[in-house]
Amino acid sequence: MKSCPAVAISKNEMGIVTIDSNKCIGCGYCQWACPYEALHFSKDGTMGKCHLCVDRLGKGMPYCVESCPTGALTFGWLDRPDGEVNYLAPASITRPRLKIVNPKEIKASPLKEKREENATGLIAFTLGSEIALVYSLLRLPYFALIAFVLLAGTLLLSVGHAKVNVRSMRVILNLSTSWLSREVLFGGLSALAFLLSMFIGNAYYVALPLLVLSVISSIMIYMLKSRPSWYHPDTPMSFLGAGFTVVSPLAYVFIHSPALLVLGAVFAVGEIITARSKAKMGFKDRRILNLPYLVLEIATFFVPLAGVVTAVVSILSEIIHRREFFQKVVYYGVPTV
């Protein structure tokens, strides 16, 4: 319930969790957070789950009995199969007809793997917001325009991830507990503030903190304990590293400060370390492109224009890594024996 940005999930006084399909935007974030595999997409693009026939509660009959279309589930006496009774049989005459023999040893694993469909918008916004943050932080040429274009364009792609676009504005309704609501709201307000800063310079000091909050929210969205491949040091390192490894060599073209190259190199090495630590989960990308990136940073020190090529290599490295991030999702589910 806390993860739903559209306030579409509720729990009644009996503890039954239900989803209001008229409020659901189909973003799937609740499915990410749920470790029980209870949530699924319905045909109309909204999320659905078993709601324990909540509409039949208190009517005096088991709900599977009332809802069975063939009448196969009924109460009655064994010697009178055609006779029906409207009460439960006494416990003294009911005996189990099944005998369950447990195996000597049960090997069950709760870890499962799947891929996140339609992740293009998610990749675009996470990379775009991170690059916009560092670019505007360093106040490089046309930073307000570039930050606005990156944020506005990729945010629209990200919101398009929701399957019910007509209700996509509901994504900002749960600011109190949903990191997704915070990411979208802070990112959208930051884009507007950057647009305003092109006419009123001081709006920059509003836009930048909002963007910082949006990026923090992005990181927290994916730090889900139910998904160990995301709940990993590589996630914050990758999200922060994307901005600094891409922008640092570009900044050196305009600001010939070796500290910028050192900063990019530190994050590039950090990304290599955390990516390799994920290899235990079967991840193939180990940030190989970060090695030529480090070599190109040395070349950039002597030939500043090489920073453009260095930034391109970094973008490719980030896209490859982020793509695997969404295509190979290790998560906790119902154990399989």
Image: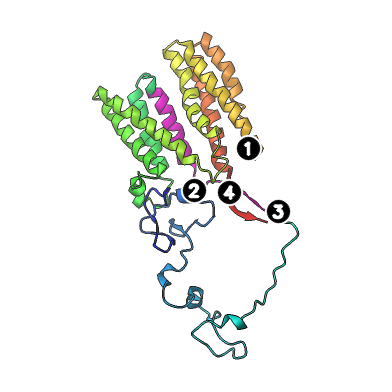
Q: Earlier in the sequence, mark 3 or mark 1?
A: 3
Image point 48% across, 74% down: which residue?
Answer: 63
Q: What percent of the width, then of the height, locates residue 158?
A: 42, 41
Residue at the outermost right position: 104
- Mark 4: which amino acid? Tyr
Residue neighbourhood size for the residue with mark 3, other residues' Cα within 10 Å, grouped as few (<14), some (14–19), many (≥20) = few
Q: Earlier in the sequence, mark 3 or mark 2?
A: 2
Q: Is residue 264 left or right of residue 334?
A: left
Q: Which residues are magenta?
A: 107-136
Q: Earlier in the sequence, mark 4 or mark 1?
A: 1
Q: Which quarter of the image is occupied by the C terminus?
A: bottom right
Position of residue 177 relative to residue 98, above or below, is above
The residue identified by callout 1 is 283
Mark 1 vs mark 2: give the one in front. Answer: 2
Instruction: In this rendered view, identify the residue nearer to me: 178 or 13.
Output: 13
- Mark 1: which amino acid? Phe
The residue identified by callout 4 is 332
Q: What percent of the width, then of the height, locates residue 308?
A: 48, 19
The residue identified by callout 2 is 33
Mark 3 vs mark 1: give the one in front. Answer: 3
- Mark 3: which amino acid? Lys
Asked if one can make out residue 282 in the rendered structure from this viewpoint, the answer is no
Task: Determine the secondary structure under disc 2.
Answer: helix
How much space separates mark 4 and mark 1, taking CA atoms?
17 Å
The residue identified by callout 3 is 107
Position of residue 140 relative to residue 74, above or below, is above
